[in-house]
Image: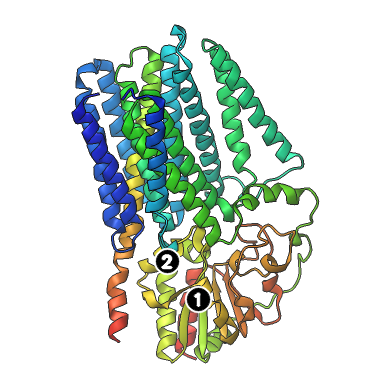
Amino acid sequence: MSTVTSLIYLLAAILFIIGLKFLSSPRRARQGNWIAAAGMILAIAWTAFASASIFTRTGLIVCIVGVLLGGIAGAVSARKVKMTAIPQMVALFNGVGGAAAALVALASWLALAAGHPGLQRTLPEVVTMIIGGISFAGSIIAFAKLQELITSKSLTYTGQYLFNGLLGFAILLLTGVVLAVPGSIILLIILLLLILALGVAFVLPVGGADMPIIISLLNACTGLAVASSGIVLNNFVLIAAGILVGASGTLLTKMMSDAMGRGFFNILFGKAARAQGYISTGDKGEGRPVRAGNVEDIGMLLAYAHSVIIVPGYGLAVAQGQQVLRELADLLQKRGVEIAYAIHPVAGRMPGHMNVLLAEANVPYEQLKEMDEINDQFKQADVALIVGANDVVNPAARHSPGSDIYGMPILNADQAHNVIFLKRSMRPGFSGTENELFFDAKTLMLFGDAKESLTKLVAAVKTA
Amino acid sequence: MNEPVIVVLTYIVLTAFIGFEVISKVPTILHTPLMSGTNAIHGIILLGALLIAVHAQTPLEIGLGFLAVSLATINVVGGFVVTDRMLELFKSQRPGRKAGKET
């Protein structure tokens, strides 16, 4: 590798580091993204240019067509996806990245297998295939769960620990065999199938609400797979970028699970423990009566309240009701009602997601309050207006050890004088756990699409 | 880059420390965009895919190469575009903030 290439790769790595640093600061985050992109273009363009002499004609066509198709697919899907579907897109992009890493290692393996390559080559190749493959399979399951193609509930069964452990052990054993006998394609295929199976098995027991943390972890894993592929290909910038992502991703995963108040291991393994003996609180209470409110009553309640705390959730975003919600809030403010938005760290699927959605609707920044800031104020609030949120206000998180969401810090909406839920139906929230706050005596339910309900409330408040 | 293992190991350890340190102060509100941004950065695997696909000849090599290149490009392009979209909305908050301070 020439000195120029090394210098360019070093520059690219520097740009990635600066990009990451800026991404951590609200003022410079957008620039940070562009700086990292610049580093990316630099590294890739130079590599393509410097490899010009070793391109075969077929190779050139494969690369150009691949980049064009991938570029269009990536750009179009990223542009058109609704903000509410961003988390699953991140999972999807992560998954294909992991797959790409595994494929690179696989291609390298197949190219050399016949010639008895040494362990310093085959070992990183296998490691890349394992990490990349697990990341790919796990990310696809995460995507499916978030997109609600498969159930978003945590899927557990007795003996799950044991099964996953055995699977992992089988992979290790088979890896040893495959390293000893690199020529056997059959063994390699079996190994790859086991790897994909473990990826799936690993993510199936994770509940929808915890998914962002797993995605962050898989993101870090793909980074490690990329670093490992860099060892295979003897390429500095792959290693550097891969480790940057692996390390920052790991720390970010820890930070995200702290923000959710969930111990990380609790998320991975807690579910399986619960399957072995606890009853879920959702079993009782079907058919319990709820107080369904009518729009005029609720409008009056809101119009004459001293303070209203709004708890927005995913349902609001899905209904695209942010604008109408802001209209309602503005209307109430003109009448002298104090308004605040309580943003739970996990509202809307991922930390920061709800802030972004409300920003779309021009909700003033100062009215958005984080959970810790606002939790004490609920007991003085006249109304807690919960729009499309559910798990984040479910008291079961405080006192039901059997519940999927136990231990998650929640917004104290149940402490407000009145609680209003805007929901489409009695369906449980993302975690699949029933919310006992629905049945509380001071709770009123307003059923319907969030946007429609809010529009009716705006009209009701105007005439109240 | 055919340095001895210990040099590579040194790179890895030092880079890991940089990775930890550089994002250690990220506010909660930026967790998701940061995750998306790092997602885009690991799209650099495209570089690896190109190096592999460059001399593809047998149908298998062509197939694997093409798949690796296109998937990696989806990761890279999709990743940066999605991150930019998330961050677009942070910018518009600032005028709102200023307006709030003026009242």
Q: Residues within 10 Å of mark 1 (few under 14, many from 20)?
A: few
Circle 2: residue type = Asn
**Position in image of residue A195 (x %, y %):** 57, 29
Q: What residue is shown with label 2?
A: A355
| Real-space CA distance between mark 1 and mark 2, rounded to the nearest whole angstrom | 15 Å
Asked if one can make out residue B86 in the rendered structure from this viewpoint, the answer is yes
Q: Residue A341 versus residue A149: which sits nearer the camera?
A: A341
Q: Residue B33 versus residue A252: which sits nearer the camera?
A: A252
Q: Among all residues in the image, which is located at the extreme front?
A: B6
Q: Residue at x 68, y 60 (%)?
A: A433
Mark with earlier residue (1, 2): 2
Q: Residue A121 versus residue A82: which sits nearer the camera?
A: A121
Q: Residue at x 33, y 58 (%)?
A: B87
**Position in image of residue A87 (x %, y %):** 46, 52
**Position in image of residue A74 (x %, y %):** 35, 41
Disc 1 with disc 2 on a shared chain = yes
Left or right, residue A7 beside residue A311: left
Circle 1: residue type = Glu
SS at badge 2: helix
SS at badge 1: helix
Q: What residue is shown with label 1?
A: A373
